[in-house]
Image: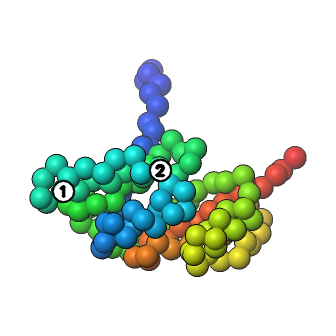
Amino acid sequence: MLDHMDWKIELVAIPVTDVDRAKDFYTSIGFNADHDHTPSPEIRFVQLTPPGSGCSICIGRGLTSAAPGSVEGMQMVVASADKAYEQLIAAGVAATPVEDMGWGRFTFFADPDGNKWAVQELPNYS
């Protein structure tokens, strides 16, 4: 019998072209800037966490070989898609109007490099 062990997703790399522009974008929509370190000229590590999340993203230099803007399908869950949409619009983000897709209400947006995000309000099945 195998021992149970938690496997937690803690950090996801998001490839960007301009680290400062991306950091400004993510903090403008409410992400907390946890770390910003340059341990060497080739590496800059910026960790950002959405409010209430147990998983962070990292942006920077020398962290991933993925092309900037190539990430699709990142998803956050919120209590209210309408409030999330309003916050995104207030921050100047081109978010899509909230859409009910049956398995939740969604708004979508992209960061300045084109990395694509979904924001989901879970359905109430009760």
Left or right, 58 with reference to 76 = left
| Visible residue check, residue 105 | no
Residue drawn at (52%, 52%), measured in percent from left and top? 50
Residue drawn at (74%, 72%), measured in percent from left and top? 99
In the image, farthest residue toward the right = 126
Q: Position of residue 23 (x, y in %)?
A: 39, 62
**Crowd around label 2: few <14 · some 14–19 · many ≥20 (10 Å):** some
In the image, farthest residue toward the left = 41
Task: Using the image, tell me which numbered label, if any, was put on residue 43.
Answer: 1
Amino acid under label 1? Ile
Residue identified by numbered label 2: 32
Q: SS for tag 1?
A: strand
Q: What quarter of the picture does the N terminus occupy?
A: top left
Q: Position of residue 79 (x, y in %)?
A: 72, 52
Which of the two labelled residues, at mark 1 and mark 2, occupies the earlier sequence position? 2
Nearer-the-camera pick, 1 or 62 = 62
